[in-house]
Structure formats: structure tokens, C-alpha cells
Image: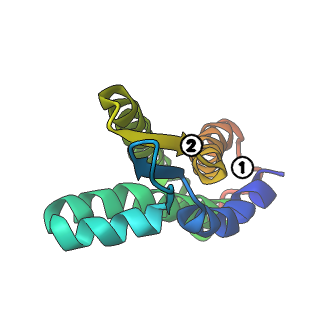
Amino acid sequence: MLIGVNLALLVLFPLSWFAPLMRAGLLPFFNLSEISVVSGLQALWQTDVSLALLVTFFAIFAPYLKTIGLALVQFSLLSPRVAPALHILGKLAMADVFLIALYIILIKGIGLARVETAWGLYLFTACILASLTLSIASSRVKPSHVPPA
């Protein structure tokens, strides 16, 4: 079951990057534009490259590398000793969801823009939480067969 959920994340993560996280617009008079992880990163790359690198790592590389690493451990292609590093990657990915939530709160608090959360935010958050839960559950499962080192 853990392997199946982890493999599903390999499909769900890329879907969540293109799904709308929120709809935002200036003041209540204008149409709302959909913002996804990818569209947000595209805008960020045009304005602040160093921040774009950091956010790209948190939003895309950290969760996906962690999911791939966990799959490799589950199929005995990678040593279980990398589990702590994979757990750290999962925590770094969770920081991205926190930042998105913080931006939404700040924008709503200013009152100059209208922001509505969209289904992609819930999908992205669920993927991150599922990945974190999988790494915790996988660390508790003792392998029945340990390959020779």
C-alpha cells in the first residue's frame, strides 16, 4: 500500500504544480487570474532569480526528489540509511505550503487585492502531507529482507 501511494505521488506532484493554487486580482472590480506553482515560478524568474531558485527547489525538486528517493528505498535500490535525508527534504517541501498560505493571508489583509484559494492548493498540500506521512510510516516498517551491503 505504501509503495502504491508513493508511486501515485509521482503523478500527482506534477499535476499539482500546474493546478490553480489561487485566483487573484486587483480590487474587487477586475477579473481574477489563476496562479499555479509553475506560473508563479515563471513570474518569479523574471523578477528575482535567486528567490526563484530557492522557491523552485522547495516547490518542485525537494518533494519530487524525496518521493523518488523513497520509491528507490521501497524497491531496495537505495539504502534505508538515506531515510533521514529524505525526511528533511519532506520538511523543506512543507515550508513552501506555509509560504503560500502566508502570502494569501498578507494579500487579504492589505485589502487591495482579492484572493480566492483554488483546488490546486489543496492538492499540492495533500501531496506534501502524504509524502511526509509516507516517510514516517516507511521508517517504522522493518524490511523483511535486507540486501547485502
Name the side, left or right, on which 139 lies relative to 98: right
- Determine the residue positioned at 56% across, 43% down: 117
The answer to whether one can see residue 56 in this image is: yes
Cα distance between the residues tagged 1 and 2: 41 Å
Q: Alpha-carbon neighbours of circle 2 within 10 Å: few (<14), some, or many (≥20)?
A: some
Residue 78, by quadrant, is bottom right
Label 1 secondary element: loop
In the image as oriented, which residue stretches furthest toward the top? Answer: 109
Q: Nearer the viewer, mark 1 or mark 2?
A: 2
Q: In the image, residue 17 lies at what x, y percent? A: 53, 64
The answer to whether one can see residue 91 in this image is: no
Q: In the image, residue 34 lies at what x, y percent? A: 52, 60
Q: In the image, residue 82 lies at what x, y percent? A: 46, 54
Q: In the image, residue 120 lies at what x, y percent? A: 61, 54
Q: Is residue 12 above or below residue 21?
A: below
In the picture of the structure, the residue carrying the numbered disc 2 is 117
Q: Nearer the viewer, residue 34 or 103?
A: 34
Q: Alpha-carbon neighbours of circle 1 within 10 Å: few (<14), some, or many (≥20)?
A: few
Name the side, left or right, on which 126 lies relative to 27: right
* Tag 2: amino acid: Thr
- Determine the residue positioned at 40% across, 32% down: 108
* Tag 1: amino acid: Pro
Colour style of the rendered protein structure: rainbow
Disc ID at residue 98? none
- Determine the residue positioned at 67% across, 57% down: 146
Name the side, left or right, on which 67 lies relative to 3: left
Q: Nearer the viewer, residue 20 or 16?
A: 20
In the picture of the structure, the residue carrying the numbered disc 1 is 143
Q: Nearer the viewer, residue 68 or 41?
A: 41
Label 2 secondary element: strand
For the image, the number of numbered tags is 2
Q: Are marks 1 and 2 in contact (CB under 8 Å)?
A: no
